[in-house]
Image (cartoon, helix red, strand yellow):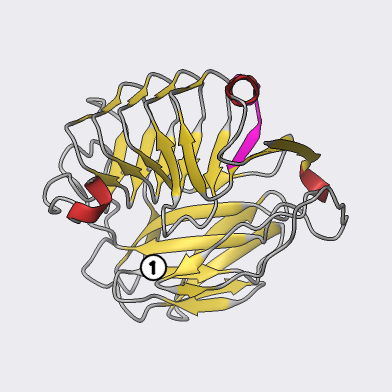
Amino acid sequence: MMAIETGRFMRLTAYICASAAMLTGCGNRGGSRDPDRPFGDTAVVVVVNPQVNDGNTTEIPPPASALRERVVVDSEPGGAATTDATGLAVITDVAAGDAELVFDGSVALPLTILSNGDVYDLAVAYGGGDVAAYPNFAIRYGIGGDIVVFASDADPTDVAQALSTNGNIVFFRNGVYRGDLLITGDDVIFFGEGFTERQVVIDGNVEVRGTGVRIRGFTITGDLTVFGNDFGMAFSVVRGRADILGNAVAFLRNALCGEVTVPSSNATLLDNEGMAPLPNPPQELCE
């Protein structure tokens, strides 16, 4: 099943979770249009001082430290949130435009939110007296272009067409999609519903040949092979091999169950289970 809507008018949930708590409300599907509700809610997901994985080849910002829990992140203008024990905070009361993220009321990091409805995954190094974003971050999931929504019974031909179109946002509802996927379009955003639960399952292999592709919130039962540059992936599981062959990649909080190959240069790898020094992911994620 497939539905295509214009990005500004799609009533669609962009689930943003901190720990087990759901922080955003739900829209509804069915073709209705609401000009005041674009794709999901604008949100900035901040991860403070993530663990740097072996294989990372970008520079670690100097303010990196052991601070993670109870860091107050205040968006000016906008809302605020406090990091949990893993360094994660989610700020949803933000809007398009120039802003500053102020850490513990002392140091600020500029951030420009390009459009209402955008979601940003932002990894930062914070030392109390200074703050900086890690290279290749933030990962932006923008709302431009068509939003293409698929259920688990989607026609493979429709899916293939969506993944070959530049600038598409491809949103998968919870469920299991069976079959291999090939992403050839540039700037494709591959967005899974309820990303922290990783309940959107691609039962097959995923190959990425487009540039600027973003993947968020999926469990991939097979292999992931990425040839395109400027690739970003967060909050996902890969049960097979992960061969990342493009340049300028960003990986944040993924669970990687098989062997991993990453580029020799310009790869930012943070908080990924299954890559040293972090242990292998929980067994239930890899079965």
Vertical comparison of 65 with 233: above or below: below
Q: Specify the quadrant that holds the N terminus.
A: top right
Q: Residue at position x 59%, y 62% from top?
A: 43
Secondary structure beneath label 1: strand
Q: Residue at position x 54%, y 52% from top?
A: 193
Vertical comparison of 176 with 224: above or below: below
Q: Residue at position x 28%, y 39% from top?
A: 58
Q: Nearer the viewer, residue 237 or 119?
A: 237
- Left or right, 82 with respect to 265, comes to right
Q: Percent x, y for residue 191?
A: 55, 44
- Left or right, 67 with respect to 188, comes to left
Q: Is residue 153 magenta?
A: no
Q: Percent x, y for residue 29?
A: 75, 53
Vertical comparison of 112 with 225: above or below: below
Res 160 → quadrant: top right
Task: Look at the image and give the residue range highlighted in magenta.
Answer: 162-171
Res 119 → quadrant: bottom right
Q: Is residue 167 magenta?
A: yes
